[in-house]
Amino acid sequence: MTHGLEPTEEYDGSITVRLLDDDAETETIDCASYERAIELVRERQHSVTVAKIVDRDGAVVFTSAEMEIDDWEGVWQREKRSLSVHVEEHDCPYDSISCFADDLCVECQIDTVRDQY
């Protein structure tokens, strides 16, 4: 019997971190959560050539060669929060897939400010 809240998300351990080093073999580490994968990348990214996070579908969702882990984590947290709340529908006139009523794309933000004046 557990004392407290049950976890809201469960992972099957199929999120992996790949640590690629030019001088050694590629190391693959299975993680139980994205939080653990982010923590692992933070710990090891400066000791390897490239650190990657791979989702359960085999898609690389983060690579240290292209982005800082802190920036990626911020985007991941925002997307996770967006999925967990009901957001009113918003049709972006610029067809931006990342434009939501509560988190407008830059073009829609500009339009909103322009319409206020």
Image (cartoon, rainbow, N blue to C red):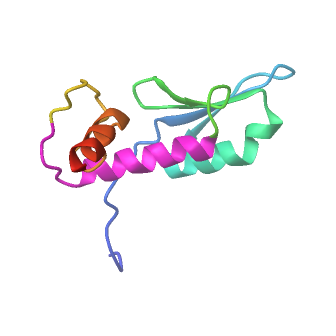
Horizontally, residue 59 falls left or right of residue 108, namely right
Instruction: Say which quarter of the image contains residue 5.
Output: bottom left
Residue drawn at 79 percent across, 32 percent down? 48
Magenta stretch: dominant secondary structure: helix
Where residue 82 sits in the image (x, y, percent)? 29, 49
Q: Residue furthest right?
A: 23
Quarter of the picture holding the N terminus: bottom left
Residue furthest to the front in view is: 117
* Residue 71 x/y as whole percent: 57, 43
Residue at 25% in and 25% down: 94
Residue at 35% of width from left, 48% of height from top?
80
Which residue sits furthest left?
Answer: 89
Q: Tell me where the magenta segment starts and ends, as one range.
A: 69-90
Q: Residue 105: where, in percent of width, then height?
A: 33, 37
Name the residue furthest bottom. Answer: 3
Q: Quadrant of residue 20?
A: top right
Q: Nearer the viewer, residue 9 or 112?
A: 112
Q: Visible in this render: residue 28? A: yes
Which residue: 44% across, 44% down? 76
Relative vertical location of residue 17 with respect to residue 117 in this rendering, above or below: above
**Number of dots carrying numbers:** 0
**Toward the viewer: 109 or 102?**
109
Task: Decide: is 26 above or below 103.
Answer: above
The x and y percentages for residue 30 are 56, 38
Q: Is residue 10 at least partly visible in the picture?
A: no
Q: Is residue 23 left or right of residue 86?
A: right
